Amino acid sequence: MSSINCFKNCRVIIFLIAFLSGCSEEVGKPLLQVGEKAIPFTLELLDGKQINLEQNAGKGLVITFMSSWCPCSNDSTPLMKKAYLEHKNDQIVFLMIGVQDSRSKFEKFVKKWDVPFSAGYDKGDRIAKDYGVSSPPTTFFIDKNGVVKRAFYGNIAKKPDEFQQWIKEIL
């Protein structure tokens, strides 16, 4: 009887570790590093349109990988919305990419937060894999030349001043 309880407790602990690791402050470094060119991709947006990296050449780009189930993604979204509204007339593009989630849950997440900028679902997490994103939220700041200037892993809402500075760096 005690070995069965131990097994159940171990399963719960393993699940919690896996779940919570998706929202840690520093999960690990992605494959795409600061100073490297951003990897081109095409993404179908939730509204059915497509976006690709090349069409945003000459503009700063904030790409954030998020999931509906992740508390840190939920915490970070209001800051992203606020920054978008402050900079929507500047030469900067914000893009939210849903990862490690179902499309329907990600769509509900985008609607729940009334995300005012482009959002698309990364089917099979193929873009996330190319960028080396192991867990949400992960945010990349890409300059007008397509070079990664910053990458942040975790709850960006805990770094609002740095977030604003990083946006200024890519304008």
Image (spheres, helix red, strand yellow):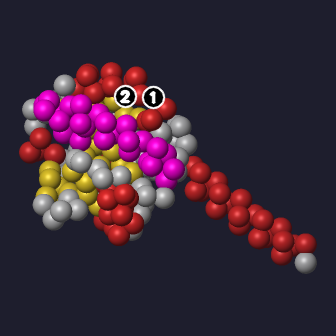
Q: CA distance from mark 2 to mark 1?
A: 6 Å
Q: Is residue 102 above or below residue 19?
A: below
**100 left or right of 59 in image:** right
Q: Which residues are magenta?
A: 70-94
Report the amino acid beneath label 2.
Phe
Q: Which mark is residue 60?
A: none
Q: Is residue 126 visible?
A: no
**119 left or right of 77 in image:** left
Q: Which mark is residue 159?
A: 1
Please provide percent x and percent y for residue 113: 35, 52
Please provide percent x and percent y for residue 80: 33, 39
Quadrant hosting residue 149: top left
Q: Which residue is mark 2?
A: 163
Q: Residues within 10 Å of mark 1 (few under 14, many from 20)?
A: few
Q: Residue at x 21, y 51 (%)?
A: 118
Q: Is residue 56 visible?
A: yes
Q: Quadrant of the C terminus?
A: top left
